[in-house]
Image (tube, rainbow, N blue to C red):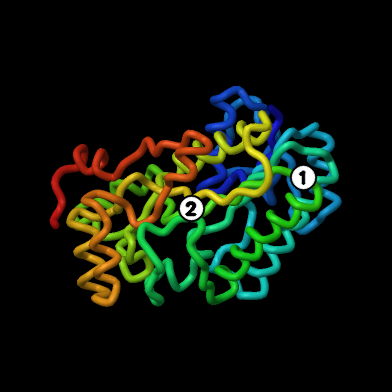
Amino acid sequence: MRVVVTGGNGRIGRPTVRELCEHGHEVTVFELMPPAAPHPAGTRLILGTVDDAGAVMTVLRNARADAIVHLARATTNHDDLTVYRSNVLGTYHVLQAAATCGLAAAVVASSIQALGDYWTLRQAPHYLPLDEDHPCAPRGAYQIAKLVIEETCRAISREHGLTTVAIRPTAVIVPERWPELLRGRSARGAGGQPAQNPLAAYVDARDVGQLIRRAVERGCNHELHGAHVFHASGADPLFVDSLSKRIAEASPDIAPLAARLAPGQPGVSIARAQQLIGYEPRYHWRDVLETTGPQGT
């Protein structure tokens, strides 16, 4: 399959490009600037921005693309207007171009932060683990933009019949950061920020690439139809002790919900991606822990 990847130089983009190439797909990377390190042999690089709708259309047509993976966006390091415009308008350009060019599928990057206050436990969830059907309560430009992206996917699917998949990664860890995260500390939460990630959810960037590749293949093979949202997360929490105990200590009002989590069960469900596209996380923090020595609890 011929796949265009926007944002292919990023922490999710690079393993996604590699995953697609390793499975025999022809990849064109659409990026603002050349990569610091080369992509796999055979990858084409086109420089440009998704802010230019005409440029997106040209890339798709020249690549004769079957699918597009849209990972280019402004992060929370930018001002709110830039974050919102980059995420929402860039995604609309990509989806409209994909529909106009007759692509089979479009996979776009949303975020677990689309869940907003339920994700951070500022508001008690309706249930745990959080799945893709759980209500959302976003606040701030980034979270709002991600939820708008998901609704845009649904609208484009309804209007044009394009199969769309919005991916919600949790705390993404690139392989080179594992030793830094686990060395000399308890595996309490991604990046040592339990307040920002109270469910201790994480995912290796290579597993996000795997999920994206599977979504592309299912969409192009017409095994997926319509609009889908998938959580991209690990199979267990990034935490040594009981997640339910941890949540109960930090948020006593959520203790009854947390008590329903089985030992080792993550706070973010990946069941939908497992059932519909065969996603299975391959990288687990406990495996890394075994190779770097015991940590505190």
Quarter of the view holding residue 185: bottom left
Image coordinates for residue 131, horizontal then vertical, percent: 45, 56
Q: Nearer the viewer, residue 138 or 14?
A: 138
Label 2 sits on residue: 169
Image coordinates for residue 107, horizontal then vertical, percent: 64, 45
Label 1: few (<14), some (14–19) or many (≥20) C-alpha neighbours in 10 Å: some
Q: Can you say which quadrant of the picture contains the C terminus? A: bottom left
Label disc, if present, on residue 21 of the rendered structure: none
Asked if 81 appears above or below 270 in the picture, the reply is below
Q: Nearer the viewer, mark 2 or mark 1?
A: 1
Q: Residue at x 29, y 53 (%)?
A: 238
| Residue 15 shows in this picture | no
Image coordinates for residue 21, horizontal then vertical, percent: 59, 28
Left or right relative to 73: residue 244: left
Q: CA distance from mark 2 to mark 1?
A: 25 Å
Left or right relative to 165: residue 246: left
Q: Nearer the viewer, residue 166 or 14?
A: 166
Q: Can you say which quadrant of the picture contains the N terminus? A: top right
- Quick one: SS at disc 1? loop
